[in-house]
Image (spheres, rainbow, N blue to C red):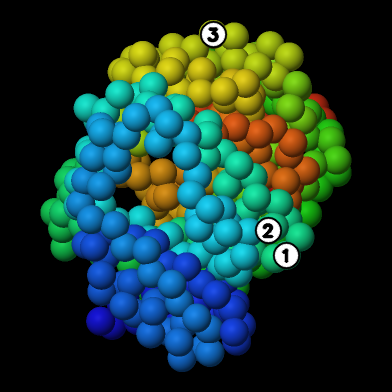
Amino acid sequence: MFYEEKLARLICEYSLEIKENQVVEIRGEACAEPLIKACFKKILQMGAYPIVKMSFADQMALFYRYANEKILKMIPESIMVAAKTHDAMIYIDSESNTKQLSGVDKQKIAVNRNATRVLKDIMFEREAHGKFRWNIAPYPTASMAQDAEMDFESYSEFVFDACKLNEDDPVEAWKNVKRFQQGIVDRLTGVKSIRILGQQTDLTLNVESRKWINCCGKHNMPDGEVFTSPVENSAEGEMYFDMPTSFLGVEVQGVYLKFEKGKVVEAKAEKNEDFLLKMLDTDEGARFVGEIAFGLNENIKFPTKNILFDEKIGQTMHLAIGSSYPEAGGKNKSGLHWDLIKSMKNGRVYADGKLIYKGGKFIDG
C-alpha cells in the first residue's frame, strides 16, 4: 500500500486541500480498490466524509448497449443533488478493459453526453466560484499497460514517475513545478494572439483577456501543462495532430482540423475518421475550441493512449474541441471535451507576432 497511501496523501492534502466536514466523492472501477481504500482512509483521517461510487468491469459498455433513449437522457435527482452539493470529487482513472466502448453505438454515447452536459456545467461553475474541487488520478492495470505497449511493472514505474511519487517529497516536487510554470503563465498573460506553426499547421487564436492556467497537480495527477480557453469564434487556419489518442476507448490517429470563424469546417483522420465526425456532431459547441495548451511534463516522453498522461507530454501542444473552462474565461458549452495532441519538436509559436517557442521549448526573450 506504500504507493497507494503516498498518492492518496498527495491528492487529498495537496491537490484537493480537503477540509473538515467536507463531502468528498470517490469514483473508480473495482480494479482500483487499493487506491480507493487509501483515499477513503485518508479522507476520514482529515475529518471529512467520503462517499464511494465504485463501478464494475464493463459497466459503461452494458449501459450503452441496453439503455433506451429515455434512459440515456435521464439524470436521476440524486446525481443532480451530488453535482450541486458535494465539495470535492476524486476520479480514479483505472480500467480493467480500456476497449470496452469500442463496439458501442457512438450515437448513443453522443446522446448521453449531450444530455448530461448540465452536470459538467454545474461543477465547472461551482469550481469557478471556489465551491467545488476535483482531481483525476491514475491507478495502473494490465489493460492500460497493454495500450502503452509496456509490461505491467514498467508501466507502473512510468505512472509513479510521472506523478513524482518516486521523489522523497512529492508535494514539494509539485510545488517546484508550480513555480516553474508560473513563469510561463506570467509570460503569456496579456498576450492577444497566438499563432502555431508546424507540419500541416498554421493556426491563429485570439486569447485576449483570457486567463492562462498553471496546471500543477491540482486537477490532474500527473500534471504539467499551461492552458487557456481561446475566444470562441477566433480560431482560423489548420492544425494536424500527429500523436494517437484514445477517446471513449476508440483510438484515433492523424487528425486534421480546419477552422473558420472558430468552427471546425473540415475534419479528417487517418484512423477512425467516422468516430471523429460523430463526436464533432455531439452538439452545437463540439466544433469549437475549448482549450489550447503547452505540454510540459518531461517525465512523460511518449504517448500511452491515455489522455491523462499524453496531454502533458513534454515538447507538445494540445487543442481541445468542445467545452471550455470558465476559470480561464471560456464560454463554450458542450458535452464533448476531447484533447488532440501535436509534437512541437519541429514547431514554432508566436505571441503577438513575436517568436516565443521553438523546437518544443520556450525561448528567452
Q: Residue at x 38, y 85 (%)?
A: 41
Label 2 crowd (10 A; few <14 / some 14-19 / many >=20): some
Query: What residue does disc 2 label?
Result: 127
Mark 3 vs mark 2: which is more N-terminal?
2
> From the viewer's perspective, is residue 310 above or below residue 322?
below
Identify the image quadrant of residue 32.
bottom left
List x then y, in percent, for residue 70.
43, 31
Measured in 3D between alpha carbons, the distance from the residue under mark 2 to the one under mark 1, in whole angstroms, is: 5 Å
Residue that label 1 marks: 130
What residue is disc 3 on? Answer: 266
Q: CA distance from mark 3 to mark 2?
A: 33 Å
Disc 2 secondary structure class: helix
How packed mark 3 is, by other alpha carbons closer than 10 Å (few <14, some 14-19, many 20 or more), is few
3D distance between C-alphas at marks 3 and 1: 38 Å
Mark 2 near mark 1, Cβ–Cβ under 8 Å? yes
Q: Earlier in the sequence, mark 3 or mark 1?
A: 1
Point out the frontmost of discs 3 and 1. 1
Instruction: Give above or below for 277 relative to 2.
Output: above
Tell whether 52 sits left or right of 206: left
Residue at 40% of width from left, 36% of height from top? Answer: 71
Query: Quick one: SS at disc 1?
Result: loop
Query: Which of the pair 160/321 is nearer the observer?
Result: 321
Q: The residue under label 1 is which amino acid type?
A: Gly
